[in-house]
Image (cartoon, grey):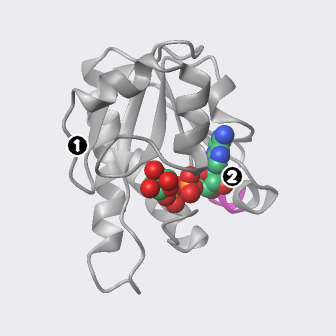
C-alpha cells in the first residue's frame, strides 16, 4: 500500500474516489463540501438528496459526475466539542468507513481531505494522527484501495502529514 501527503485542490485529483467532508444532511455546505458540489455540478445534489442523510462517523457514496474522480464518498465528521464527546472515535469511523466503501466500489486509489479540521474545529495535529493510524490499520485488512492520498489545503496541514509519513 502507498500512503502519500500532497497539497492541492481535491476536486482536481484523478483518483478513483475522493472523500468529502460533509454534514449529516449530505445536502452541501461550505469548505471542501462546497468546492466539491460546485465542481461536480448539480446532479450531485440530487444524488445526495436521494441518500437521506448519514450519521456522524459514517459515509455514503455517489458518482463523481463532472469530477475526474469516478466516485465521491461523503463522510460526516464530528463537530469538535472539547474532545470528551467521542470525537476521536467518530473521526476514525469516517476514515474506516470511507475505505470500506471504496473497497466495495473496487477503487484502487482514494484521496482524503483533512476531515473535520475546518468548520468543525477538530485540532489538526490530532486529526492527522487519527487519519494516518486508521488508514494503516484499515488497509491491512482490505484488498483495496492500494493508494491513499492525504490532500492538504494548507502548508501547515501538509507538514503535519509529512511528519507522520516519513520517506513518503
Ligand atoms: N481541497 C482540499 N481540501 C480543502 C478544499 C479543497 N478544495 N477546500 C477546503 N479544504 P471543511 P469540516 C480543506 O471546513 O471541518 C461544510 O459546510 C480545509 O482547509 O471543509 O469537516 C460541510 O457541509 C480543511 O483542512 O470541513 C459541513 O457542514 C478541510 O478541507 C462542515 O463544513 C476540511 O474543512 C464540515 O466541516
Which residue position holds label 1? 53
Is residue 7 or residue 25 the one in the foreground? 25
Count of number-bearing discs? 2
* Membership of 162 in magenta stretch: yes
Q: Residue at image x 35%, y 70%?
A: 88
**Is 108 included in the stretch rendered in magenta?**
no
Q: Identify the main secondary structure in magenta.
A: helix
Left or right: where 6 falls relative to 96: right
The answer to whether residue 68 is above or below residue 119 is: above
Q: Earlier in the sequence, mark 1 or mark 2?
A: 1
Q: Nearer the viewer, mark 1 or mark 2?
A: 1
Residues drawn in magenta = 160-166
* Structural distance between the alpha carbons of marks 1 and 2: 37 Å
Identify the secondary structure beneath mark 2.
loop
**Towards the viewer: 8 or 133:** 8
Marking on residue 166: 2
User: Which residue appears at 42% of the width and 23% of the height?
Assistant: 44
Residue at the spot 63% in from the left edge and 34% down from the top edge: 10
Amino acid at each position: 500500500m502507498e500512503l502519500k501527503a500532497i497539497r492541492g485542490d481535491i476536486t482536481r485529483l484523478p483518483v478513483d474516489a475522493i472523500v468529502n467532508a460533509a454534514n449529516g444532511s449530505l445536502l452541501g455546505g461550505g469548505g471542501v463540501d462546497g468546492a466539491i458540489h460546485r465542481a461536480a455540478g448539480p446532479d450531485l445534489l440530487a444524488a445526495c438528496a436521494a441518500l437521506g442523510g448519514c450519521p456522524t462517523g459514517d459515509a455514503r457514496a455517489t458518482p463523481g459526475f463532472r469530477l475526474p474522480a469516478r466516485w465521491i464518498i461523503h463522510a460526516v465528521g464530528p463537530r469538535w466539542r472539547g474532545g470528551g464527546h467521542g470525537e476521536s472515535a467518530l473521526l476514525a469511523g469516517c476514515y474506516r468507513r470511507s475505505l470500506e466503501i471504496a473497497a466495495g466500489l473496487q477503487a484502487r486509489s482514494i484521496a482524503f481531505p483533512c476531515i473535520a479540521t475546518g468548520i468543525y474545529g477538530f485540532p489538526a495535529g490530532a486529526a492527522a494522527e487519527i487519519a494516518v493510524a486508521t488508514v494503516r490499520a484499515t488497509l491491512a485488512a482490505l484488498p483495496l484501495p492500494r493508494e491513499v492520498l492525504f490532500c492538504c489545503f494548507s502548508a501547515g496541514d501538509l507538514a503535519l502529514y509529512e511528519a507522520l509519513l516519513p520517506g513518503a
